[in-house]
Image (cartoon, grey):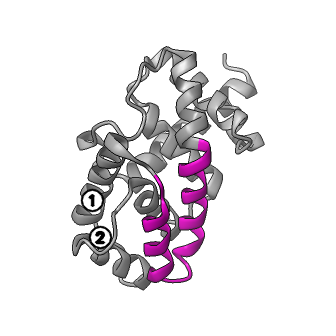
Amino acid sequence: MKTAAELLALQTREEIHRVAKLCAPCLDYLGLLTFHRDTTSTEELKRWQDLVWTPRILPAIDKAHTACKIGSRELIDIDRQLDIAGPLAKTHRAAGRLLATNFTAPASEPALLKYLEAVKRDESPGHFAVVFAARASVFHISIPMTRAALLFLEMRAAPIESLWAILEECLASSKTSTASLRAA
């Protein structure tokens, strides 16, 4: 018999996976995003977290999630300002473009529709974090759950026995976790 904490952790994990699949239906076709290192190396994970996740991706997620309700220009600005360099930028943008060009938005979401069109026309880079967060916003997914789902996608190459511990550590150390996500 599972304890209440174990059941909550299981439900949270299921919700993170559901959100990842909802906001990135091309999940099975995504390559690596920005974490290209050994997921079992605490040092490499910490370095990525300090140089990429916390200073770049987290702010972009939060801004894009909010901007999606404001307008497409704001989304394009956030996308252009996201500072990821080198091979990380290439893979992150390739995944974002895959998502932007293969999946649309509801007609009732003009900001997202216009932003996706700008990505398709190469007027905006199409960073995965921005496309993903904007999609999460139109699906009314909370920012903390959006962060957790995107982090899950970054770490999905981790061994299953360590995946949820990695997620929890990254969310907790970047001070983005909530009580409901700590159960993951």
Q: Which residue is mark 2?
A: 119
Q: What number is the disc on residue 37?
A: none
The magenta segment is 54-83
Q: Residue furthest front?
A: 86
Q: Residue at x 43, y 74 (%)?
A: 76
Q: Is residue 99 visible to us here?
A: yes
Q: Which residue is mark 1?
A: 97
Is residue 106 positioned above or below 9 on the image? below
Q: Residue at x 27, y 38 (%)?
A: 31
The foreground one among 35 and 146 is 35
Q: Residues within 10 Å of mark 2 (few under 14, many from 20)?
A: many
Q: Residue at x 41, y 56 (%)?
A: 23
Q: Is residue 92 left or right of residue 154?
A: left
**Rendered location of residue 107, percent (x, y):** 36, 83
The foreground one among 101 and 79 is 79
Q: Indicate yes or no whether the magenta region holds residue 67.
A: yes
Q: Quadrant of residue 61?
A: bottom right
